[in-house]
Amino acid sequence: MLNWLSQISAITLANLKTLPERRGAAVAAAVGIAGVVTVLVGVLSIAEGFQRVLAVSGSPDVAIVLRSGSDAEMNSGLTHDDTRLIADAPGLARNAANLPLASAELFVVINLPKRSTGTDANVPLRGVSPAAFDVRGNLMMLEGRRFEPGKNEVIVGAGAARQFSGLDVGKTVRVGQTEWVVVGVFAAGGGVAESEIWTDAAVLQPAYHRGDTYQAVYAKLISAEAFHTFTDALTTNPQLSIKAVRQSDFYADQSTQLVGFVKGIGITIAALMAVGALFGALNTMYSSVAARTREIATLRALGFGSSPVVVSVLLESLALALAGGVLGAAGAWLAFDGHTTSTMNWQTFSQVAFAFRVSPALLVQAILWAAMIGVLGGLFPAIRAARIPIAAALRET
Amino acid sequence: MTTDQSPLIRIADVDKTYRRGAEEIRVLAGLSLTVQCGEFLALMGPSGSGKSTLLNLLGGLDRPTRGTVEIGGERIDALSDRRLAGWRARHVGLVFQFYNLLPVMTAERNVELPLLLTHLSKADRRKHVATALAIVGLAHRTSHYPRQLSGGEQQRVGIARAIVTDPTLLLCDEPTGDLDRKSGDEILSLLQTLNREQGKTIIMVTHDPHASSRASRTVHLDKGQLSAAAPA
Amino acid sequence: MKFLYLVACNLRRKKLRTLLTLLSIGIAFFLFGLLGALKLALTGDVSIANADRLMTRHKVSIIQMIPISYQARIAAIPGVSGVTAQTWFGGIYQDPKNFFASMPVEPDEFLKMYPEFVVSDAHRQAWRTTRNGAIVGRTLMERFNWKVGDRIPLSAPIWRHADGRDAWEFEIVGTYEAARKSVDTSQFFFRYDYFDEGRGQNKGTISWFAVRVSDAARADAISAALDREFANSAYETKTEPEAAMMQGFAQQVGDIGAIITGILGAVFFTILLVSGNTITQGVRERTEEIGVLKALGFTNTLVLGLVLAESCLLAVLGGVGGLGAAWLMTIGGSPLPSLLPVFYVPTPHLMLGAGLMVALGLITGALPALQAMRLGVSEALRRQA
């Protein structure tokens, strides 16, 4: 065994010493693999970033109550009485003043120009009740202050402030006949709320001729387990025709389609590219073996086994692939991680700001791809190397 | 090009130096040589004496550092690269020690290569190729690849390629150097025939006295100059 | 042409290597084709937007409704030659996953406004006489195996009846075909009068107007006049050309163009290196042969040309194969009709591909070709000795 290992290391070292002479081919193969890894990581980081925004948005102990048959706030509608009944349901958490942590909310979409392109984009404008801040639990003012109830004031999420023009503190946003003053910028733990503009629901209702209706109730539960008590009470109430969803499930659902689509496309493209890069690696390794035919034959004549030859070729190929993989992964991480953008969330028909996210798991996945290309690209040339007829190869000039 | 009596080649006071690092190597030193039309000249000399360099100058593959090379009345050392290539294609046939056939092509296609540079039609090219291969005695092996031919046969293809454009001058660099005695003899006989019957002027580099004995004249080269050594 | 054989011979020299190179170039162009189709599918073909068609919607956002009574006022604006109302219905067939576009429209005005939807006279007539009649695109018909005459229930969470029910029933009275390849044939159109009568709220309002102007050159002025007409009303409008609307919408999805260009950049950079290296290697191995060709009288320019011809031949063979495969794959329709209803490689993209093949050939061949050209004959021949 030890002998075998020392044979491998002897041959591999000899191979690697000739690498500078073949650097053109070696660099081409490694960079080819780096290209695959960059595209893979780049595209998947979009999916990861989007998924993450929605994943951190939802908490299992918050319930969203919508009109039955609705799957989004946009096409839901609740009366003032509905929201009262919901706030009285069992399982709800209460604040120090013993008021239920339930926020009746309105959800509309307004058009604002994107900073990057200047074209109109759909931005969510949410009217919330005073309890909303305690229900979300993770809202933090980054700048300015909260809006005052009853006033035409808005606060904007950090993502929205970054992506759309005219949302700086002190500016006025004109929506239809109403003017809103931006009084603050908030963070919400990186979640969807950061893409929204918030105001007092009681002010938004008349501005949108909504009378005393709402679209959803966000309710904080005593615990995640209290969800069943809460929903059972609501669904069995004959006065209500509603459905309740856990906030975590609600947002996870919103990301599945887009994430699935982007991942599917990213993996398809990267897989096709990987095949192309594999051909490059095969070419490199075949010519590497061809260039060393005599050398390998000499080693074999000296008594080296054929399996160390195979392993050494594989190791060389793997080393090139890993170099390419690390290069590509590092490049993709530098280029894409944290890059902020926004896209359409079809469920809300409005923009979600997010940042590309190159997670450690994604980097590991990318390196595994590179390793796979390396092993496949080295395998056939390695077999050819092992089959070199010793006597004939030695005669060759 | 010229009549039989006038000299075909006039080399006057030619120097050829190469640089190897800081060192300057003088391969040819003030060499002058005249070759008549129709001669079969053997160039002999120890390795490093400048035989191949001289042959390269005669073939227009290289230029002298100093001096003139005049062939058929033309100063080929003064031609541009482009004109020189055209001149080679028309006036010189080259035969190499290792044949230098393109391994990916049949004998026929190898012989056709120089004709691609002419304006001949495909049919005419075919005719010329067949004639050249018949002259070297390979009419029956036209569609073989070089690797399917023996050394002697490969050299015959090489000679066919050299004569297919009907050049005046054949330059042979150790044409028998890689062959056994029997095949070598056959090649030498072929060259003699080409010299006598087709009137080709042949200059052959060799270090084999047996080969040089077939030539009509032998000159010896030593340290880049013609030496006065007696013929073998 | 007589040198083609020489070029082809060199490609046959190492068949495995040539094959691998061809395949990797082929894959690059296959991706090029598919990504071109994907970009078109995601952003729409702006070049097909009619310059004389405008869209008028609520200024605040497209989800805000505007009164249908505006139709007459728009029609009265000088330069407007046609106007018709459309509304986002958001109908669901059986399961929310079965998503497709469904809209109430005014049949005659609608078909006049959009000549790219081709409906037979018989189907038009049936639509006029059937109150709950719907005209459905061919690919949507195929997707659900619908036939003309079928009664289709759709639920519309946005549009409920007065009693709160969200179920609507339609009768398919006809189908439409696309006048051009870029037209989406997966939509579902039904009558506005049936819709307005059945809905319980927001009666008399619509999502947007499609407006035709008689002179496309005056589109901007007419848009401005139109928005001025409704300025300071309860429903201010925003009017923009169809193309601008499509582009703006694509921008909302993301900068798809930049992402796809980035991916293609990486693909081609990778392939450029891989195949460029192969060609360089191939030329280096033939140093003596190139010397022989030059000795035989081949000029430097000719040798340069031969190497470039070789790299271009590789690029074009691989490129035509790859782009051809992508073209063949999309010619029969979208491979994912439910997700990407319009999916084909647009002709300008094919042309760009052809240009890229030549460019790739020239770039990958440039370095080895220059090396071959500069190669001195006597040095090249000396190498073997």
Image (tube, grey):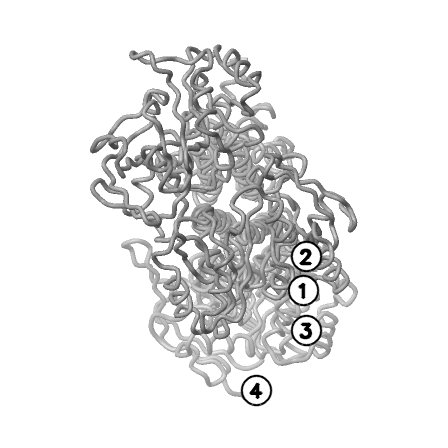
Which residue has dot 3 on it? B193
Three-letter code for the amino acid on which mark 3 is drawn: Thr
Please give the chain letter of the residue carrying mark 2. Answer: B
The Cα–Cα distance between marks 1 and 4, rounded to whole angstroms, is 28 Å
Which residue has dot 4 on it? B4
Badges 2 and 1: C-beta atoms under 8 Å apart?
yes
Labels 4, 3: one chain: yes
- How dense is the environment of label 4, judged by Cα within 10 Å: few (below 14), some, or many (20 and up)? few
- Residue C127 on image: x %, y %: 71, 57
Q: Nearer the viewer, mark 3 or mark 2?
A: 2
Mark positioned earlier in the residue sequence (4 or 2): 4
The Cα–Cα distance between marks 3 and 1, rounded to whole angstroms, is 16 Å
The image quadrant that residue C292 belongs to is: bottom right
Three-letter code for the amino acid on which mark 1 is drawn: Val
* In-image side of A362 versus C349 (left or right): left
Which residue has dot 2 on it? B146
Which residue has dot 1 on it? B157
Three-letter code for the amino acid on which mark 4 is drawn: Asp
